[in-house]
Image (tube, rainbow, N blue to C red):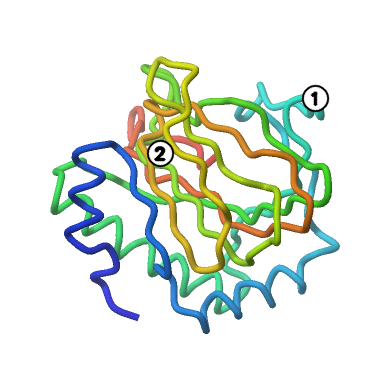
Amino acid sequence: MTAQLISDTYLDAIERAGYAVVENAIDESLIADLMADCYRINPHFHTAGIGRLNDQQIDKTVRKDKTYWFDSSSQAQITYLATMEAIKTQLNRSFYLGLFDYECHYAKYQQGDFYKKHYDAFKGRSNRIFTTVCYLNTPESGGELVIYKPKSKDIEIVVKPQAGMLVMFESERFMHEVLPANDVRYSIAGWFRKNASISGIIDPPR
């Protein structure tokens, strides 16, 4: 595993367009270990909510996936977090973003599960700067990620899940959705964040 995971080509795409789709970004052996970790914790996945902290609620008309937040309980999680730390350092050096930390969870979409159009961050209300989606398996169909053009209902790109692929995009800029899954779809959703601490208290992790 090398620290330079994002090539200049993809860094240029992020700078120019605000997003990048990196195929084979994560090593096959790590992807296999992460999938094995998902199988290990399968009984502990929880129905995903919307909103944060005290505002969080379950609304299955908006999203139906199940999630499990990383807790560093496996070597696979630790290795993935180290990989994201390397990418965070690279993004900071390239764009002077001041990214502070990274949070992520496994996401499991079973047949019929979806996540309707939403933003991962809102101006002035969140410290999430970049969203990442890492795919752990390759479903035959369904579960595509649709990213919309900024301030538009027009589609920017439709991403078909592929094991090892890493998608990155600006959290405040792009509305996106996950189309209904036809096959079980495993991924890792994560966010690079700035520190929004007050009086030395770090912003809650999720």
User: Relative to the observer, which residue lies in front, 60 or 124?
Assistant: 60
Q: Residue 190 location, x and y as percent? A: 49, 49
Q: Which residue does the image show at 67% across and 52% down from the upper left?
A: 107
Q: Is 6 placed above or below 37 here?
A: above
Q: Say which quadrant the N terminus sits in.
A: bottom left
Residue occupying the point 74% across, 40% down: 180
Which callout, 2 or 1, points at the residue further toward the start of the chain? 1
Label 1: which secondary element: loop
What residue do we see at 33% from left, 42% from top?
A: 19
Q: Position of residue 26 (x, y in %)?
A: 44, 71
Label at residue 202: 2
Q: Residue furthest bottom?
A: 29
Give the mark toward the camera: 2 or 1.
Answer: 1
Q: Dot 1 corresponds to which residue?
A: 61
Q: How many marks?
A: 2
Amino acid type of the residue that numbered disc 1 sits on in the rendered structure = Thr
- Give the CA distance from mark 2 to mark 1: 32 Å
Callout 2 secondary element: loop
Looking at the figure, which quarter contains the C terminus?
Answer: top right
Q: Mark 2–mark 1 contact, CB under 8 Å?
A: no
Mark on residue 82?
none
Q: Residue 82: give x, y in percent of width and height.
A: 39, 69
Residue lying at 32% horizontally and 38% vertically, measured from the top left:
194
- The picture places residue 2, in percent across and down from the top left corner, at 29, 78
64 or 86, which lies in front?
64
Mark 2 residue type: Ile
Image position of 143 (left or right of 29): right
